[in-house]
Image (cartoon, grey):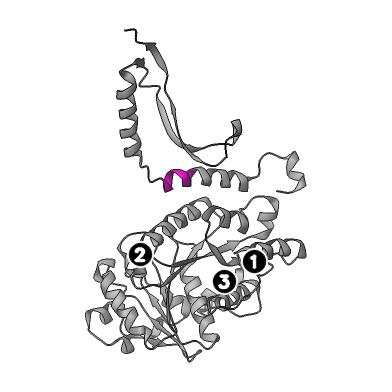
């Protein structure tokens, strides 16, 4: 990227590069959608023992760390977003 | 010592056949004895890019099935005394040949040739497995596009899994004007993502279309693509050649050549 790109929106080559990096993380980890689905179901089963979760709203994906909070960027990470409906009381 | 080199990419249409034709011809120009093998059974194309389509008598499947000797099927290129083409079969499919048969054939050809260049079909199925079976090393061809790079990454993984000792990258169809504007990934970007050794970059050059129209590989001719292919050939035989300035200007040149030295 040159100097003038500061005044423009993100260049398309950078968009391509970012998309590719993310894509290759999931490709290389050979996590097919089927396997992701299995992982998701297992996570639901474990967490459901302790709290009631919103299975519809649950989202897991493989991504990369972005380097915030002092961690190294570009490390593959499994990120799960699990909405809790209610914590079970014993 | 002879070498078997497979030219592969995963994705179709990125320039495997053009690269095979030019690398084979270029190595012959460097006085190496070369045979080009088209392993794309059913979709034969290397013969037309080489301009040898009218001289086919026997093909790869005939050789493998024992209908003829390898020598009978190989077409001698009259323009270069050291260059031969073993064409593919057009009316058969990929399952007509097995990886073991291909390995046996390439091992046989090692005795007579310095370089055996295999033009691999697109995809990762049997055609790919056939093509890589006997290969010592690979030239992975990609273009600076998301889809082509993604497929190249998959291919590199499969080559590693099949214990190919060496894979080198060719970035094809570069348009330096677009790279400069930030609308095309640069050589550096592609190498950074795929993390394998770069052996050359070829510009998107209209001379390639003209050369293919005429059935004459342009390697070594006086244009950027011709020079780029020749440089790749010289690197294959072990020479150290700095990366070509594809933009025609000095600023980017130093940047790119610096990148190449690192590898």
* Whole-percent x, y for residue B27 in the image: 52, 82
Is disc 1 placed on a helix, strand or loop?
A: helix
Which residue is the extreme one toward the top?
A89
Q: Earlier in the sequence, mark 2 or mark 3?
A: 2
**Residue designated by label 1:** B261
State the residue in front, B97 or A69.
Answer: A69
Depth check, mark 2 against mark 3: the one in front is 2
Reading the chain from its start, which is encountered first: label 1 or label 2? 2
In the rendered structure, which disc, 1 or 3, sits on the residue that comes first in sequence?
3
Taking the spot 70% from the left edge, 51% from the top edge, the residue there is: B181
Residue B138 against residue A17 in the figure, above or below: below
Q: CA distance from mark 2 to mark 3?
A: 25 Å
User: Is residue B245 within the magenta segment?
Assistant: no
Residue B44 appears in which quarter of the rendering? bottom left
* Tag 2 and tag 3 share a subunit: yes
Q: Residue at x 30, y 74 (%)?
A: B102
* Frontmost residue, A63 versus B92: A63
Q: Quadrant of the C terminus of chain B?
A: bottom right
Res B228 → quadrant: bottom right
Q: Are marks 1 and 2 on the same chain?
A: yes
Circles 1 and 3 in contact, beta carbons < 8 Å: no
Q: Which residues are magenta?
A: A23-29
- Give the residue pinned by disc 3: B208
Residue B215 location (% of width, % of height): 50, 79
In x, y percent, where is residue B94? 29, 67
Residue B81 can be seen, yes or no: yes
Q: Do the residues under discs 2 and 3 have CB atoms within 8 angstroms? A: no
**Neighbour tally class for label 1: few under 14, some 14-19, many 20 plus, Cα within 10 Å:** few
Q: Chain of mark 3?
A: B
Measure how far apart labels 1 and 3 are at the Cα level.
27 Å
Give residue B205's position: percent from left, percent from top: 61, 68
List the residue tagged with mark 2. Answer: B128
């Amino acid at each position: 990227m040159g100097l003038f790109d500061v005044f423009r929106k993100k260049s398309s080559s950078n968009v391509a590069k970012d998309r590719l990096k993310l894509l290759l993380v999931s490709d290389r980890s050979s996590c097919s959608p089927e396997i992701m689905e299995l992982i998701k179901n297992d996570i639901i089963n474990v967490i459901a023992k302790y709290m009631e979760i919103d299975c519809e709203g649950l989202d897991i994906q493989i991504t990369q760390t972005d380097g915030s909070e002092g961690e190294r960027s570009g490390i593959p990470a499994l990120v799960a977003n699990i909405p809790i409906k209610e914590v079970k009381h014993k | 010592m002879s070498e078997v080199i497979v030219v592969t990419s995963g994705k179709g249409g990125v320039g495997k056949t053009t690269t095979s034709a030019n690398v084979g011809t270029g190595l012959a120009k460097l006085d190496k004895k070369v045979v080009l093998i088209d392993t794309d059974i059913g979709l034969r194309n290397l013969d037309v890019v080489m301009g040898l389509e009218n001289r086919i008598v026997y093909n790869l499947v005939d050789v493998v099935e024992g209908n003829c000797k390898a020598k009978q099927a190989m077409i001698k290129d009259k323009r270069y005394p050291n260059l031969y083409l073993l064409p593919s079969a057009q009316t058969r499919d990929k399952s007509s040949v097995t990886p073991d048969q291909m390995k046996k054939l390439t091992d046989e050809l090692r005795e007579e040739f310095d370089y055996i260049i295999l033009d691999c079909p697109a995809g990762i199925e049997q055609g790919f497995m056939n093509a890589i079976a006997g290969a010592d090393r690979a030239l992975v061809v990609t273009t600076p596009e998301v889809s082509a790079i993604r497929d190249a990454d998959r291919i590199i993984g499969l080559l590693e899994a099949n214990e190919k000792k060496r894979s080198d990258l060719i970035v094809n169809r570069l348009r330096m004007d677009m790279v400069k504007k930030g609308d095309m990934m640069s050589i550096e970007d592609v190498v950074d993502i795929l993390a394998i050794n770069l052996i050359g970059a070829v510009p998107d050059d209209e001379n390639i279309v003209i050369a293919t129209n005429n059935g004459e590989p342009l390697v070594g001719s006086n244009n950027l693509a011709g020079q780029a292919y020749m440089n790749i050939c010289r690197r294959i035989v072990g020479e150290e050649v700095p990366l070509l300035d594809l933009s025609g200007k000095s600023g980017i040149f130093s940047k790119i050549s610096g990148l190449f030295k690192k590898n």
